[in-house]
Amino acid sequence: MTTERAYRYRFYPTPEQATLLARTFGCVRFVWNAVLRYRTDAFYQRQEKIGYHDASAFLTQLKKQSDTAFLTEVSSVPLQQCLRHQQTAFKHFFAKRARYPHFKSKKHRQSATFASSAFSYRNGQITLAKCREPLNIRWSRDLPSAPSTVTVSKDRAGRYFISCLCKVDTEALPITPKMVGIDLGLKDLFVTSEGQRVNNPRHTARYARKLARAQRQLSRKQKGSNNRAKARLKVAKCHAKIADTRRDHLHQLTRQIVNDNQVIAAESLQVKHLVKNRHLSKAISDVGWGELVRQLEYKAAWAGRQFIQIDRWYPSSKRCHGCGFVQEALPLDVRVWDCPSCGTQGIDRDLNAARNILHAGTALLAGAESCSKYRGALGN
């Protein structure tokens, strides 16, 4: 099966390339904001929907104006790609799959997408349009094929990355009879139905003192000064270190789970609602449940595995995995409980939930349409 995958690398631009990229990022950001304002005014004031062709015509008018003639100094391809991305964002908004597109700020991550007509890929080197020299990319692995598009980005820590979209022929992993259910948590990152416990590394806590010191230094700098910009960069680098460490740890865990199991069942969590708990919001954000599930989903699809999420209202913790009895209430501080129906004692809350998640997942794969049918099959 042929799919498209993005391969991300870090690169180090020359001063000339950094200047050109800064100008390109600024033009892309300006076009996004200008066209978004144009479409917003048309939608809310005149109840008129502006499509991609109208937005492209508006961009042409901007290039002809004297005060926005700087848009012609960069490649036109990233500007057109910006309009396509905005059109996709509005498509998701009208389909109620995403929020309304927001304006972009120069203080956040900057990016620009180049189609195949705006870059060259020869002898393992990529040269962008209007650049004299190829990019100094640190190739951690070879590209499987010539990229169709490349996206150049700069994060808040000042690091440059390039993402290459390539076509790849995927091969499914050998079939294995192993199946696993995963219960997500805070004390333990997750507990499997086999009894394996993966501790929560608490990445933010590891760098808490360093981050707090950098934030204190930032708060003492005068707004708009060069020293404040340097202090802000230190804070951004600390956040980037935490994010990179968390992402690398999750990649290792999800790769091992996908390689070892044919069927993977997990619970479906609404993280955006859970973080509203002011007592647990920081811990929930740090543990990375959403990223863990996202990686499991796409890696399982690539490897030919079956990944399934059960309904978030399924009482995995309150149900006895032996007899199916459901407790009326089970507070979070109760980690071990006894089943009054079958007499099983010392039921571990997390392990019991992981086993119930696996049972519910296999029931769904067997043909059940919802977890309610699975509960009905147990007579509860």
Image: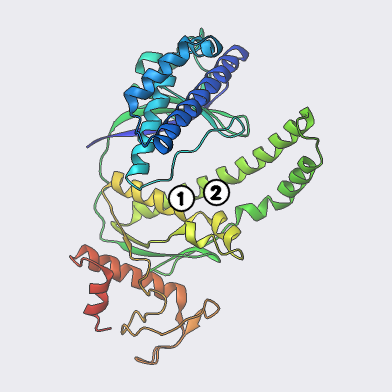
Q: Is residue 308 left or right of residue 209?
A: left
Amino acid type of the residue that numbered disc 1 sits on in the rendered structure: Glu
**Can the viewer see residue 96 in this picture?**
yes
Q: Quadrant of the N terminus?
A: top left
Amino acid type of the residue that numbered disc 2 sits on in the rendered structure: Arg
Of pointers 1 and 2, the one earlier in the residue sequence: 2
Residue shown at 75% from the left, 30% from the top: 224
Name the spot of residue 375 as percent of width and height, x first: 27, 77
Q: Is residue 149 left or right of residue 27?
A: left
Q: Is residue 182 left or right of residue 185?
A: left
**Where 149 falls versus 202 (above or below)?**
above
Name the spot of residue 309 as percent of width and height, x first: 33, 60
Name the one closer to the observer, 156 or 296. 156
Q: Read off the residue under disc 1.
A: 291
Q: Quadrant of the C terminus?
A: bottom left
Q: Do the CB atoms of the residues marked 1 and 2 lie less than 8 Å apart?
A: yes
Name the spot of residue 287 as percent of width and height, x first: 54, 56
Name the one closer to the observer, 349 or 273. 273
Residue shown at 39% from the left, 92% from the top: 340
**Which of the two discs, 1 and 2, sits closer to the camera?**
1
**For the residue carrying disc 1, how many other residues have a C-alpha within 10 Å: few (<14), some (14-19), or many (20+)?**
some
Q: Read off the residue under disc 2.
A: 246
What SS does tag 1 mark?
Answer: helix
Q: Residue furthest front?
A: 46
Q: Quadrant of residue 351?
A: bottom left
What SS does tag 2 mark?
Answer: helix
Residue shown at 52% from the left, 81% from the top: 334
Residue shown at 78% from the left, 46% from the top: 216
Residue 342: give its label.
none
